[in-house]
Image (cartoon, grey):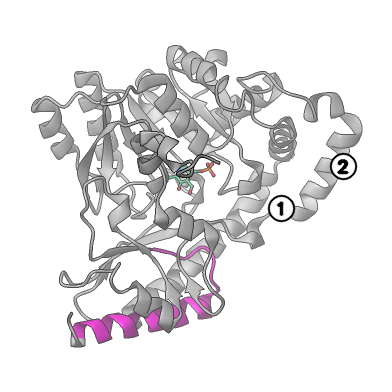
Amino acid sequence: MAAEGWSGRFARRAQARTSPELTAIIAGVPPGVLAMTGGFPNPATFPGEVLDEIVARLVRDDPGVALQYTPCEGLPSVREYLADRQEQLQGRRPERGEIIVTSGGMECIQLMCQALVDPGDAIAVEAPTYLGALLAFAGIEADVHGIATDDDGLRVDLLAEALAAGLRPKFLYVIPEYQNPTGRTLPLARRQELVELCRRHDVLIFEDVAYRELGFDGSALPSLWSLAPDLVVQAGTFSKVFFPGVRLGWATGPAEVLAELAAAKQNTDQCAGGLGQRMVEEYGRAGHFERRLPAARELYASRWRALRTALERHLPPGCSWTEPEGGFLTWVTLPEELDVIALRPAATAAGVAYVPGQPFYSSGEGANEMRLSFSHLAEAELDRAVERLGGVVRAALADPP
Ligand SMILES: Cc1ncc(COP(=O)(O)O)c(C=O)c1O
């Protein structure tokens, strides 16, 4: 070991690309604490019994493909399946060069950074936005511009102002459905305005559709990519509708950009795992997504109803929350004088965990905001968790620091 340890040799960006919040989410919580932290799918939705048969068959009949390296862009049959699926779900079929397989949505964010962003380049994001993306953008030393959101998601009028004032982002990163962290959805009229605005200013849109298929009622607005395929790169993931252990997703968009993402993938993992690719293809071609997704949507919808009832019952006046129509997440705003990071020791002692809002902003707002996930806990646990949270909030209001 070096005399002073190795940390003096770590890259400058090593400091920017990790977050204690993300580490805490992934590490889990102490026993007895009810966690409304991770945007993890509920294990009850994992298709274990079907996968048993699919994996056994692939290993037996197709080891030369399923257990081998694959082309960087993904297996041809899997790309064909993904193109069929885009056509079925989004009404437009990507051409061959317009879709690649990725190792999940997070890898697609990394590929966009590798392919498009130099240190100091501007990226526009919703404020607040997905913590993983913010860390990736910090890791590439981008200049991140948060555009405020309201109950209908991104304020397109404010983006227009920023562009008029000279903002020239490499791309705009946006999560139009059941956004992480707020649970909000961009309505159709705003989607159209956004696309028109970005077209006028030559802004590439980077659309993340991680939760798109998890609308509580199964409906979905037109994706940004389907509205403007020449202007939008879409990142999708099978983590929320299949299982995250498969680490599989896709990128769809203009062929010129997709070729560059595929080239960047040579520098990450070279290819997504062949076994996972073939599993998704077999599972999807057999119609299991259509068969199983309605039950998953109903599970998350019923958990949200339970959480909403609990919020109404247990949080004191002055607190508010978003009303998601799908996905796993809601965003709670406490009275302004409270600081949710400062409240965390009391929350842990009371046996409840949430994710503080501040890390989801690029510029330090959100001290009195928090993200709650309803995907994991049972309905009675959600009630108990919010009862505990309500107690902590009331105590803090009664005894300000
Ligand atoms: C908005 C959003 N994008 C991307 C991801 C990453 O997904 P994946 O597991 O496919 O890397 C997540 C995971 O929580 C997410 O919430």
Q: Closest to the observer: 113 or 301?
A: 113
Which is closer to the viewer, label 1 or label 2?
2
Question: Where is the N terminus found, in terms of image quarters?
Answer: top right
Circles 1 and 2, Cβ within 8 Å, touching? The answer is no
Question: Percent position (x, y) of residue 268?
Answer: 56, 26
Q: Closest to the observer: 154 or 129?
A: 129
Q: Is residue 216 visible?
A: no
The mark found on residue 4 in the picture is: none
Q: Is residue 383 magenta?
A: yes
Residue at image position (33%, 85%) is: 391
Total marks in image: 2
Name the outermost residue toward the front.
3
Residue at image position (59%, 57%) is: 296
Q: Is residue 235 above or below residue 187?
A: above
Question: Percent position (x, y) of residue 374?
Answer: 47, 65
Residue at image mark 2: 56
Residue at image position (23%, 71%) is: 334
Disc with the residue nearer the chain's start (1 vs 2): 1
Residue at image mark 1: 47
Q: Closest to the observer: 109 or 76?
A: 109
Helix or strand or loop: what does disc 2 sit on?
helix
**What type is the residue that disc 1 sits on?**
Pro
**Extent of the magenta region:** 371-397
Q: Is residue 252 above or below residue 51?
A: above
Q: Is residue 152 visible?
A: yes
Residue 63 picture quarter: top right
Q: Is residue 349 left or right of residue 182?
A: right
Magenta stretch: dominant secondary structure: helix
